[in-house]
Image (cartoon, rainbow, N blue to C red):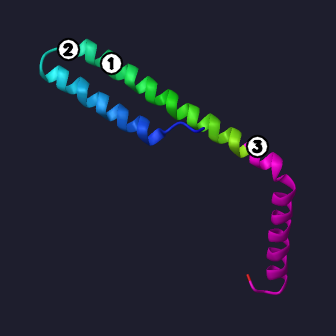
Amino acid sequence: MLPDLIGATRDYWRKLDEVEAAYRRHELTTAEVNAQVEALMVELGNTRRQLLRDSWAIFQTFVQQQGDALAGMAALGVLAYVWLVANGQA
């Protein structure tokens, strides 16, 4: 199952708002805010990288399973283009 990138981004912004609110209440120092923001950015970055890895794996599996069909469609597309060029249509 693919990671929920939109949900992860919403969580990131919610947590970022919580950090900002804590800073405004003087509960966190600037260094602590920087550390927490960096940790949140790493967490969101990991989710994004996982989504890209999973999407790439799904794409590779699709190409492996449907390789012949994709090659046939590409061949038909090339033939149609050649026919259009040969007949002065393109």
Position of residue 27 relative to residue 20, above or below, is above
Task: Name the main secondary structure of what is drawn in magenta.
Answer: helix
Which quarter of the figure has residue 34?
Answer: top left
Task: Give the amino acid type for the residue marked by disc 1 in the picture.
Answer: Gln
Position of residue 59 relative to residue 45, above or below, is below
The residues bearing labels 3 and 2 have C-alpha atoms spaced at a distance of 47 Å
Checking the image for residue 28, the label placed there is 2
The residues bearing labels 1 and 2 have C-alpha atoms spaced at a distance of 10 Å
Mark 1 nearby-residue class (10 Å; few <14, some 14–19, many ≥20): some
Whichever of labels 3 and 2 marks the residue nearer the N terminus, that label is: 2
**Residue 11 appears left or right of 76:** left
Nearest to the eye among marks 3 and 1: give it. 3
Name the residue rendered at 45%, 23% in the picture: 42
**Residue 71 appears left or right of 45:** right
Residue stretch rendered in magenta on the structure: 60-89
Residue corresponding to mark 3: 61
Checking the image for residue 36, the label placed there is 1
